[in-house]
Amino acid sequence: MRRTKVKKSVCFIIHQTKNGFSLVNTLFSLLIISSILLFIPSIYQLFHTSSYTSEFSIRQFFHILNNEIQTQTFDYHTEHTVHLINNKEENVTISLYGSVVRRQVNRKGHEILVRDIKKFSIKTVKNGIHVTITSLSGDHYAKTILFQ
């Protein structure tokens, strides 16, 4: 009798068991998948939280500007600049410079008050000024500051 040699080939024989999936295994798998799907929206919100730092910095700028105007003498304003005179007879200007609003004393120095500004405009109202700011993200902020 001839003996045949077993050749190694690419095809493998998959051993199948007589046991299949039971209903309990299927229900357990569905339970795990559905619980994972329930947590996906809450995990997504953790990664995509909105930042309030730009809003906070603009509100802080309004507070600083109000303090500057209340403690110093208002001189005049242009479309993008407020000119004040402090107690030492120095000229203080708060103006838009690129994408920042800066404060200068006697046209020297460069103190940045708020960043990422697209538009900074000043208008005169009765007994004060109306300041409007548009951030680079497109948010609009406005405040009316009254003189005392």
Image (tube, rainbow, N blue to C red):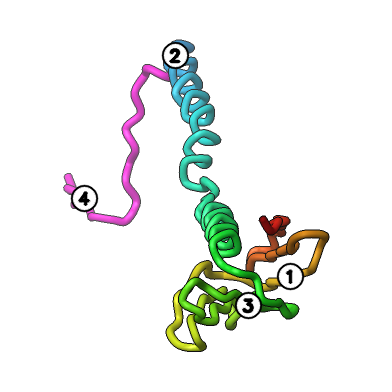
What secondary structure do most residues of the magenta stretch adopt?
loop
Question: Looking at this view, is 11 or 78 the one in front?
Answer: 78
Circle 2 or circle 1, nearest the eye: 1
Structural crowding at the residue carrying mark 1, measured as other residues with C-alpha within 10 Å and reported as few (<14), some (14–19) or many (≥20)? many
Inter-mark Cα distance, 1 to 4: 91 Å
Give the SS element for disc 2. loop
In the rendered structure, which disc, 2 or 1, sits on the residue that comes first in sequence?
Answer: 2
Inter-mark Cα distance, 3 to 2: 81 Å
Q: Mark 1 = which residue?
A: 122
In the rendered structure, which disc, 4 or 3, sits on the residue that comes first in sequence?
Answer: 4
Q: Amino acid at mark 4?
A: Val
Q: Amino acid at mark 2?
A: Ser
Residue 22's label in the rendered image is 2
Name above or below for residue 131 compared with residue 100.
above
x, y (%) of residue 18?
Answer: 37, 19
Residue at coordinates 67% horizontally, 55% vertically from top-left? 148
Question: Looking at this view, is 126 or 65 the one in front?
Answer: 126
In the rendered structure, which disc, 2 or 4, sits on the residue that comes first in sequence?
Answer: 4
Inter-mark Cα distance, 3 to 1: 11 Å
Residue 97's label in the rendered image is none
Q: Amino acid at mark 1?
A: Ile
Residue 129 within the magenta-colored segment of the rendering: no
Inter-mark Cα distance, 2 to 4: 36 Å
Q: Are marks 3 and 2 in contact (CB under 8 Å)?
A: no
